[in-house]
Amino acid sequence: MKALFAVQRRPTTSYGFDSGATFFDTSAPGLAAGTLQQYQYRIGGRYFPAAPVQTSAIGAAVHNGACEAFLELQKSLNIVGDYRLQTNVNAKNWALPPFSILNGTFQLNNLLPEYDYQMSISDLGNTGVPLGIVTEAPLNSANENSFSGSMPSSCFAMSTNLETSNGVEISGLNAEEQSDIALIANWKNPQVLGTSLNGSQTQTTGGPSNLEVYSYFDAMIILRENNVLELIQ
């Protein structure tokens, strides 16, 4: 096994939102926010990485940008320092907490960041909560809208690198000999229902999020005599 990835997503997809959005947390900002504090994987009797990945100060409700988690993701994808291919991951969508928007004279809070360029960020509060504005439809476009906001959908993953070699041979952690694999993640408070924007109204959506874990493993098929295929994992 070469790497592990865990993401928090909606339990069911919806036409009105970006189904590819992965959330850092889904609870309202403030003292009761369910901000992710740290995570770590336990495989058998060993921990990966050796020290927990800190995504906020212990006990704090404000995240630290999750830059350490981003570096762990880069190591898992083997792209540390590789600038040949620019990704769409930046400070505007990495580990983005639920945000607020101004809709006329009313402020709508705890919107999940899953609108994929339908909005733009106008401000970033001292608690790390973005303030967004809805990107209006072009003039005389009736009910159509060509979105051109500056805020992509949120993306975040709890990953760890298990690679043991940079060569072409089979490499990684032999997970078959381990008793179990566990993800240890600590939030300040439980995750809660998120809200979404529906026209000028807000509605509670989604229900509890799903935590999906994906394993990236190495495998090789060897063609032997008499057309016998042997799978090596």
Image (cartoon, grey):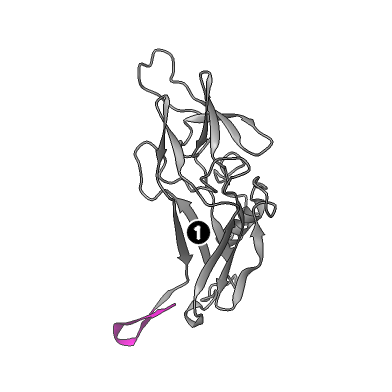
Is residue 230 shown in magenta?
A: yes
Measured as percent of width and height from the top left, residue 61 is found at 64, 46
Is label 1 in a helix, a strand or a loop? strand
As drawn, 12 above or below 76: above
**Image quarter for residue 226?**
bottom left
Is residue 196 shown in magenta?
A: no
Residue 2 appears in the rendering = no
Q: Is residue 186 left or right of residue 21?
A: right
Measured as percent of width and height from the top left, residue 108 is found at 51, 29
Please tell me which residue is depicted at 49% across the width and 28% down the height of the picture.
Answer: 148
Q: Is residue 224 left or right of residue 185?
A: left
Q: Amino acid at mark 1?
A: Ala
Q: Nearer the viewer, residue 187 or 169?
A: 187
As drawn, 58 above or below 224: above
Measured as percent of width and height from the top left, residue 32 is found at 59, 45
- The quarter of the image holding the C terminus is bottom left
Q: Which residue is mark 1?
A: 6
Please tell me which residue is depicted at 39% across the width and 12% down the height of the picture.
Answer: 140
As drawn, 183 above or below 204: below
Main secondary structure found in the magenta portion? strand
State the count of labels: 1
The span picked out in magenta is 222-233
- The local crowd at label 1, few if under 14, some if 14 to 19, many if 20 or more residues have their Cα within 10 Å, is some
Residue 108 appears in the rendering = yes
> Looking at this rendering, what residue extends furthest in the bottom direction?
225
As drawn, 184 above or below 187: below
Please tell me which residue is depicted at 57% across the width and 42% down the height of the picture.
Answer: 96
Please tell me which residue is depicted at 55% across the width and 36% down the height of the picture.
Answer: 99
Q: Nearer the viewer, residue 7 or 221?
A: 7
> Looking at this rendering, what residue extends furthest in the front direction?
32
Measured as percent of width and height from the top left, residue 118 is found at 47, 30
